[in-house]
Amino acid sequence: MAALAQARATEPKVGAYLLLDEDGALDQARAIDAARKAGRPIGPMAGVPLAIKDNIHVRGLPTTCASRILEGFKAEYDATVTARLKAAGAVILGKTNLDEFAMGSSCENSALRQTRNPWDTSRVPGGSSGGSAACVAARSAWLSLGSDTGGSIRLPASFTGVVGYKPSYGRVSRYGLVAFASSLDQVGPFARSVRDVALALRAMAGHDAMDSTSNPAPVPDYTAALARDLKGKRVGVVREYLDKLPNRDVARLCEGAIARMQSLGAEIVEITLPHAEYGVQVYYVVASAEASSNLARFDGVRYGLRVPADNGIATYVATRGGGFGPEVKRRIMLGTFALSAGAYDEFYGRAARVRTLICRDFEQAFARCDLIATPCAPFPAFRAGEKSDPLSMYLCDIYTIPASLAGICALSLPVGFDSAGLPIGMHLSAPALADDKLLAGAHALEQSLAADKALGLGRAPAAV
Ligand code: GLN
């Protein structure tokens, strides 16, 4: 299998995978070949090499969440997304690296390994789904799955020059995804083209009785929707994002892509999102509060690691103290504090109210436009070790978090390279459940950008 050979060649430099299941992948591929030969039906994604973020269950394989606390744990069942993609014929190559419990923006919070950016291996791939982005960029998978709570699919997609898609909240089942912040988490695909993302989303999306937050709305044919163009579509632009961005390469490339949309027949309208600037603060209260509750289940009794001590309480303390890394502990403490009596109103309550204002900003903006275009990240991939304080890491997500808080759909699309040759992504979003419209707009832009040879899109990274 070509993807496995490619993984053998690139993994020593990139380190995208936590587990490469070569035997399992070959077995699945052989089964599909046999079905094809026998004339039995094969799915729409038959033989597509797929990598899965290691916080999503694949039956029989470990789910580590890149944490020591899940040492020895194996998934007993397939996540719904895993089962649906298997049924469509995708071949699972392995599990990819992430920031521990999906908390981070660089993959440096993984307790298990470091993943590097295929475009420049001194740099990070972004996070938290850094392994899933890096393997698609390195061509050691055709398609991968990530999870996105505040930007964890879109940021690494932007840093590695691939398409990363966060579906509308509820569009894709989360059954079998290890929960981080349940009012925000979504599973979504990475691929090298919008068409492949659309194909994957079609296979994954739809109601699931095992996830009460999954939306019952019928799933449109996302690939058929790609035939629509941008003519007459209104694209909202937040002027000050572009004008005030310190990194002028990012601003220039986004301006170029917006001008391209205009040349394709879109009307550019200026919009404002007045409360989006509080997104990061709101997110770190809400997401940490939910994480503190979700992560209570890792107690040394039910799953993975157990550090035995004199009594039950001492066992919890020793297991959680030894099993969680520093960023996860920080979030649990922050979230527990934000929910505590006395602090609740001032922190959680206020954050929830500002979240409502951010949702309203989007409602008002989408009354005037069909899509919103902004930068995806304020800068390209940074060097490993460069961001050592948590706050500067948190600020990577200033442009992605508002869409997560509002539950709308959003993606990162590669729009060119900066002066150092690093890929830059643009963030496009659309209202909740308008995933078909978002994909159609992104596809039209992608096709037009690909035809512009000067942008150099489509070329392979250095580590490939
Ligand atoms: N970087 C953000 C965080 O650390 C977002 C993570 C995510 O989307 N899973 O929480």
Image: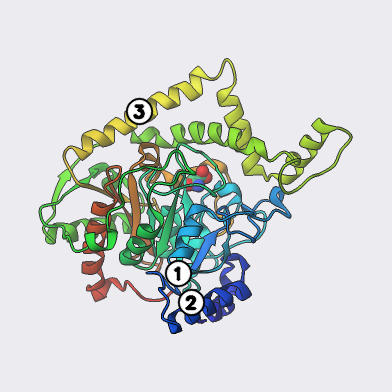
Contact, CB < 8 Å: mark 2 with mark 1? Answer: yes
Q: Nearer the viewer, residue 291 or 259?
A: 291
Q: Nearer the viewer, residue 136 or 89?
A: 89
Q: Nearer the viewer, residue 364 or 31?
A: 31
**Reading the chain from its start, which is encountered first: label 3 or label 2?**
2
Residue located at (86% from left, 38% from top): 309
Vertical arrangement, residue 49 with respect to residue 165, above or below: below
Where does label 3 land, which residue? 356
**Reading the chain from its start, which is encountered first: label 3 or label 1?**
1
Indicate which disc residue 32 carries: 2
Q: How many angstroms separate mark 2 from mark 1 (CA)?
A: 7 Å
**Mark 1 neighbour density, 10 Å: few (under 14) some (14–19) many (20 or more):** many
Is label 3 or label 1 in front?
A: 1
Amino acid type, residue under disc 3 in the picture: Thr
Residue located at (27% from left, 58% from top): 221
Residue extending furthest top? 342
Residue 460, percent from left and from top? 41, 76
Q: Quadrant of residue 313?
A: top right
Q: How many angstroms separate mark 3 from mark 1 (CA)?
A: 41 Å
**Reading the chain from its start, which is encountered first: label 2 or label 1?**
2
In the image, 153: left or right of 104? left
Where does label 1 land, which residue? 89
Label 1 residue SS: loop
Residue 205, percent from left and from top? 38, 53
In the image, 371: left or right of 296? left
Amino acid type, residue under disc 1 in the picture: Gly
Indicate which disc residue 250 carries: none
Q: Nearer the viewer, residue 152 or 2?
A: 2
Label 3 residue SS: helix
Q: Quadrant of residue 355?
A: top left
